[in-house]
Image (spheres, helix red, strand yellow):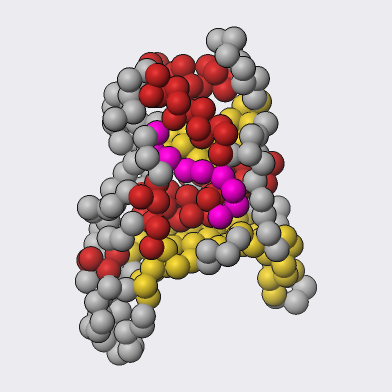
Amino acid sequence: MASEEEDGAIPTPREYHPGKYVLLFDPLDGSSNIDVNVSIGTIFSIHRRITPEGPGILKDLLQPGRKQVTAGYIIYGSSTVMVYTSGRGVHCFTLDPTIGEFLLLNPSITTPSCGKYYSVNESNYPRWTPGYRRAVDTLKGVDGRGGGKNARYIGSLVADFHRNLVAGGVFLYPGDQKSPKGKLRLLYECAPLAFIAEQAGGAASDGVRPILDIEPSALHQRTPLVIGSSEDVALVERTLKEAGEAG
Protein backbone atom coordinates (compact mmCIF):
# COMPACT_ATOMS: atom_id res chain seq x y z
CA MET A 1 0.00 0.00 0.00
CA ALA A 2 0.91 3.65 -0.21
CA SER A 3 -0.75 6.65 1.42
CA GLU A 4 -0.46 10.35 0.79
CA GLU A 5 0.16 10.65 4.54
CA GLU A 6 3.14 8.24 4.61
CA ASP A 7 6.62 8.93 3.24
CA GLY A 8 7.28 5.45 1.87
CA ALA A 9 5.54 2.26 0.79
CA ILE A 10 3.55 0.28 3.36
CA PRO A 11 4.46 -3.42 3.01
CA THR A 12 2.06 -6.24 3.75
CA PRO A 13 2.53 -7.21 7.42
CA ARG A 14 4.40 -10.49 7.81
CA GLU A 15 1.48 -12.18 9.57
CA TYR A 16 -0.74 -11.79 6.49
CA HIS A 17 -0.55 -13.57 3.17
CA PRO A 18 0.36 -11.11 0.38
CA GLY A 19 -2.42 -10.46 -2.11
CA LYS A 20 -2.50 -9.85 -5.85
CA TYR A 21 -3.13 -6.11 -5.73
CA VAL A 22 -1.68 -2.81 -4.50
CA LEU A 23 -3.67 0.03 -2.97
CA LEU A 24 -2.86 3.74 -3.14
CA PHE A 25 -5.04 6.16 -1.22
CA ASP A 26 -5.58 9.65 0.08
CA PRO A 27 -7.25 8.88 3.42
CA LEU A 28 -8.79 12.30 4.00
CA ASP A 29 -8.85 14.67 1.06
CA GLY A 30 -9.76 18.24 1.98
CA SER A 31 -8.97 17.74 5.66
CA SER A 32 -8.32 21.47 6.17
CA ASN A 33 -12.08 21.98 5.70
CA ILE A 34 -13.16 19.78 8.61
CA ASP A 35 -13.48 22.66 11.09
CA VAL A 36 -15.85 24.56 8.79
CA ASN A 37 -18.03 21.53 7.94
CA VAL A 38 -17.21 21.41 4.22
CA SER A 39 -17.46 18.07 2.41
CA ILE A 40 -14.28 15.98 2.49
CA GLY A 41 -13.51 12.52 1.19
CA THR A 42 -11.29 9.49 0.63
CA ILE A 43 -9.76 8.65 -2.77
CA PHE A 44 -8.39 5.22 -3.69
CA SER A 45 -6.67 3.47 -6.59
CA ILE A 46 -6.03 -0.24 -7.11
CA HIS A 47 -3.50 -1.90 -9.44
CA ARG A 48 -2.49 -5.50 -10.02
CA ARG A 49 0.92 -5.97 -8.46
CA ILE A 50 3.92 -6.60 -10.73
CA THR A 51 6.00 -8.81 -8.47
CA PRO A 52 4.69 -12.38 -8.16
CA GLU A 53 5.34 -12.85 -4.44
CA GLY A 54 6.65 -11.27 -1.27
CA PRO A 55 5.43 -8.22 0.67
CA GLY A 56 5.53 -5.89 -2.36
CA ILE A 57 8.12 -3.37 -3.53
CA LEU A 58 8.16 0.18 -4.88
CA LYS A 59 7.76 -0.74 -8.55
CA ASP A 60 4.43 -2.41 -7.73
CA LEU A 61 3.15 1.05 -6.81
CA LEU A 62 4.78 3.14 -9.56
CA GLN A 63 2.42 2.23 -12.39
CA PRO A 64 0.70 4.56 -14.88
CA GLY A 65 -2.98 5.27 -14.42
CA ARG A 66 -3.92 3.28 -17.53
CA LYS A 67 -3.11 0.13 -15.58
CA GLN A 68 -5.58 0.80 -12.78
CA VAL A 69 -8.03 -2.00 -12.08
CA THR A 70 -10.38 0.07 -9.94
CA ALA A 71 -10.53 3.61 -8.63
CA GLY A 72 -13.03 5.50 -6.56
CA TYR A 73 -13.80 7.97 -3.83
CA ILE A 74 -16.11 8.44 -0.88
CA ILE A 75 -17.57 11.85 0.04
CA TYR A 76 -18.54 12.63 3.63
CA GLY A 77 -21.08 15.42 3.38
CA SER A 78 -24.83 15.88 3.69
CA SER A 79 -24.93 12.23 2.65
CA THR A 80 -22.17 9.65 2.38
CA VAL A 81 -21.62 8.80 -1.28
CA MET A 82 -19.27 6.29 -2.91
CA VAL A 83 -18.35 6.54 -6.60
CA TYR A 84 -16.18 3.97 -8.34
CA THR A 85 -15.19 2.45 -11.65
CA SER A 86 -13.63 -0.85 -12.63
CA GLY A 87 -13.34 0.10 -16.29
CA ARG A 88 -16.98 -0.47 -17.22
CA GLY A 89 -18.59 2.87 -16.50
CA VAL A 90 -18.94 4.86 -13.29
CA HIS A 91 -21.31 3.83 -10.51
CA CYS A 92 -22.59 5.89 -7.61
CA PHE A 93 -23.85 4.55 -4.28
CA THR A 94 -25.24 6.32 -1.23
CA LEU A 95 -25.11 5.09 2.35
CA ASP A 96 -28.44 4.32 4.00
CA PRO A 97 -27.58 4.65 7.71
CA THR A 98 -30.81 2.94 8.77
CA ILE A 99 -29.57 -0.40 7.40
CA GLY A 100 -25.83 0.28 7.22
CA GLU A 101 -25.60 -0.51 3.50
CA PHE A 102 -24.59 1.38 0.36
CA LEU A 103 -27.47 1.49 -2.14
CA LEU A 104 -27.06 2.02 -5.87
CA LEU A 105 -27.99 5.62 -6.63
CA ASN A 106 -26.82 5.94 -10.25
CA PRO A 107 -25.64 2.86 -12.18
CA SER A 108 -23.95 4.85 -14.92
CA ILE A 109 -22.80 8.43 -14.44
CA THR A 110 -22.20 10.27 -17.72
CA THR A 111 -20.67 13.72 -17.46
CA PRO A 112 -21.80 16.41 -19.94
CA SER A 113 -19.33 17.05 -22.77
CA CYS A 114 -19.42 20.77 -21.99
CA GLY A 115 -20.15 22.03 -18.50
CA LYS A 116 -21.63 25.03 -16.73
CA TYR A 117 -18.89 25.53 -14.18
CA TYR A 118 -15.19 26.13 -13.78
CA SER A 119 -13.40 25.41 -10.51
CA VAL A 120 -10.01 26.92 -9.72
CA ASN A 121 -8.30 28.85 -6.94
CA GLU A 122 -8.18 32.24 -8.64
CA SER A 123 -6.12 33.77 -5.84
CA ASN A 124 -3.14 32.15 -7.63
CA TYR A 125 -3.96 33.94 -10.91
CA PRO A 126 -0.98 36.38 -10.77
CA ARG A 127 1.46 33.44 -10.48
CA TRP A 128 0.06 31.38 -13.38
CA THR A 129 1.63 31.25 -16.82
CA PRO A 130 0.03 33.44 -19.52
CA GLY A 131 -1.56 30.35 -21.07
CA TYR A 132 -3.43 29.37 -17.94
CA ARG A 133 -4.52 32.96 -17.31
CA ARG A 134 -5.90 33.15 -20.83
CA ALA A 135 -7.63 29.76 -20.45
CA VAL A 136 -9.45 30.86 -17.29
CA ASP A 137 -10.36 34.19 -18.88
CA THR A 138 -11.89 32.25 -21.76
CA LEU A 139 -13.83 29.96 -19.43
CA LYS A 140 -15.25 33.08 -17.76
CA GLY A 141 -15.93 34.73 -21.11
CA VAL A 142 -14.09 37.95 -20.27
CA ASP A 143 -11.90 37.84 -23.39
CA GLY A 144 -14.74 37.57 -25.88
CA ARG A 145 -13.79 34.03 -26.89
CA GLY A 146 -16.85 32.28 -25.47
CA GLY A 147 -17.10 30.74 -22.05
CA GLY A 148 -19.41 32.49 -19.66
CA LYS A 149 -19.21 29.68 -17.11
CA ASN A 150 -20.05 30.15 -13.47
CA ALA A 151 -17.34 29.89 -10.83
CA ARG A 152 -17.73 27.13 -8.24
CA TYR A 153 -14.76 26.39 -5.98
CA ILE A 154 -15.12 24.50 -2.72
CA GLY A 155 -11.44 23.96 -2.01
CA SER A 156 -11.94 20.25 -1.44
CA LEU A 157 -10.78 18.38 -4.55
CA VAL A 158 -13.09 15.41 -4.20
CA ALA A 159 -16.12 17.65 -3.67
CA ASP A 160 -15.24 19.97 -6.57
CA PHE A 161 -14.65 16.98 -8.84
CA HIS A 162 -17.91 15.27 -7.87
CA ARG A 163 -20.02 18.34 -8.60
CA ASN A 164 -18.45 18.78 -12.02
CA LEU A 165 -18.69 15.06 -12.78
CA VAL A 166 -22.43 15.12 -12.23
CA ALA A 167 -23.33 18.65 -13.41
CA GLY A 168 -20.58 19.25 -15.97
CA GLY A 169 -17.59 21.54 -15.66
CA VAL A 170 -13.83 21.68 -15.41
CA PHE A 171 -11.48 21.75 -12.42
CA LEU A 172 -7.99 23.21 -12.77
CA TYR A 173 -4.97 23.17 -10.50
CA PRO A 174 -2.13 24.62 -12.60
CA GLY A 175 1.48 24.84 -11.67
CA ASP A 176 2.71 28.35 -10.90
CA GLN A 177 5.90 30.29 -10.24
CA LYS A 178 6.09 28.93 -6.71
CA SER A 179 5.16 25.31 -7.51
CA PRO A 180 5.69 24.50 -11.24
CA LYS A 181 4.24 21.01 -10.84
CA GLY A 182 1.25 22.19 -8.85
CA LYS A 183 0.07 20.80 -5.55
CA LEU A 184 -1.84 17.62 -6.35
CA ARG A 185 -0.35 14.12 -6.16
CA LEU A 186 -0.39 11.99 -9.29
CA LEU A 187 -0.88 8.57 -7.68
CA TYR A 188 -3.26 9.41 -4.84
CA GLU A 189 -5.49 12.09 -6.37
CA CYS A 190 -5.02 12.76 -10.08
CA ALA A 191 -4.76 9.25 -11.56
CA PRO A 192 -7.79 7.74 -9.77
CA LEU A 193 -9.99 10.74 -10.55
CA ALA A 194 -8.75 10.74 -14.15
CA PHE A 195 -9.79 7.08 -14.52
CA ILE A 196 -13.26 7.96 -13.27
CA ALA A 197 -13.50 11.06 -15.48
CA GLU A 198 -12.62 9.14 -18.65
CA GLN A 199 -15.00 6.31 -17.81
CA ALA A 200 -17.79 8.89 -17.45
CA GLY A 201 -17.03 10.41 -20.86
CA GLY A 202 -14.83 13.24 -19.57
CA ALA A 203 -11.11 13.89 -19.76
CA ALA A 204 -8.11 14.62 -17.56
CA SER A 205 -4.83 16.23 -18.57
CA ASP A 206 -1.73 17.88 -17.19
CA GLY A 207 -2.27 20.52 -19.87
CA VAL A 208 -0.27 18.57 -22.44
CA ARG A 209 -1.01 14.84 -22.15
CA PRO A 210 -3.60 12.60 -20.53
CA ILE A 211 -3.01 12.08 -16.82
CA LEU A 212 -3.44 8.32 -17.28
CA ASP A 213 -0.45 8.19 -19.66
CA ILE A 214 2.05 9.69 -17.20
CA GLU A 215 4.72 7.23 -16.05
CA PRO A 216 5.27 7.90 -12.34
CA SER A 217 8.82 8.12 -11.03
CA ALA A 218 8.15 8.80 -7.34
CA LEU A 219 5.43 7.98 -4.80
CA HIS A 220 4.61 11.60 -4.07
CA GLN A 221 5.03 12.97 -7.59
CA ARG A 222 2.98 16.09 -8.28
CA THR A 223 1.35 17.20 -11.50
CA PRO A 224 -0.80 20.03 -12.83
CA LEU A 225 -4.39 18.89 -13.33
CA VAL A 226 -7.15 19.86 -15.75
CA ILE A 227 -10.12 17.52 -15.35
CA GLY A 228 -13.81 17.39 -16.19
CA SER A 229 -16.00 17.76 -19.27
CA SER A 230 -14.11 16.74 -22.42
CA GLU A 231 -14.74 19.91 -24.43
CA ASP A 232 -13.68 22.13 -21.55
CA VAL A 233 -10.46 20.19 -20.96
CA ALA A 234 -9.76 20.38 -24.71
CA LEU A 235 -10.29 24.16 -24.63
CA VAL A 236 -7.66 24.54 -21.90
CA GLU A 237 -5.19 22.29 -23.75
CA ARG A 238 -5.77 24.21 -26.98
CA THR A 239 -5.24 27.56 -25.26
CA LEU A 240 -1.99 26.38 -23.68
CA LYS A 241 -0.77 25.15 -27.07
CA GLU A 242 -1.60 28.50 -28.69
CA ALA A 243 0.43 30.16 -25.93
CA GLY A 244 3.39 27.89 -26.65
CA GLU A 245 3.10 26.10 -23.30
CA ALA A 246 2.21 22.61 -24.54
CA GLY A 247 5.41 20.72 -25.12
Which residue appears at 34% of the width and 28% of the height? 246
Q: Quadrant of residue 94?
A: bottom right
Q: Is residue 208 visible?
A: yes
Q: Which residue shows up at 48% across the image and 55% down it?
A: 195
The span picked out in magenta is: 199-207
Q: Is residue 147 left or right of residue 178?
A: right
Image side of residue 136 versus residue 98, left or right: left
Residue at image location 77% in from the left, 73% down from the top: 98
Which part of the image, by quadrant, shows the N terminus?
bottom left
The image quadrant of residue 179 is top left
Above/below status of 134 relative to 156: above
Q: Residue at x 70, y 53 (%)?
A: 78
Position above or below: 61 against 114: below
Give the quadrant of the C terminus.
top left
Residue in front for this viewpoint, 47 or 74: 47
Task: Please check the rendered image and state whether residue 112 is part of the magenta-colored stretch, yes or no.
Answer: no
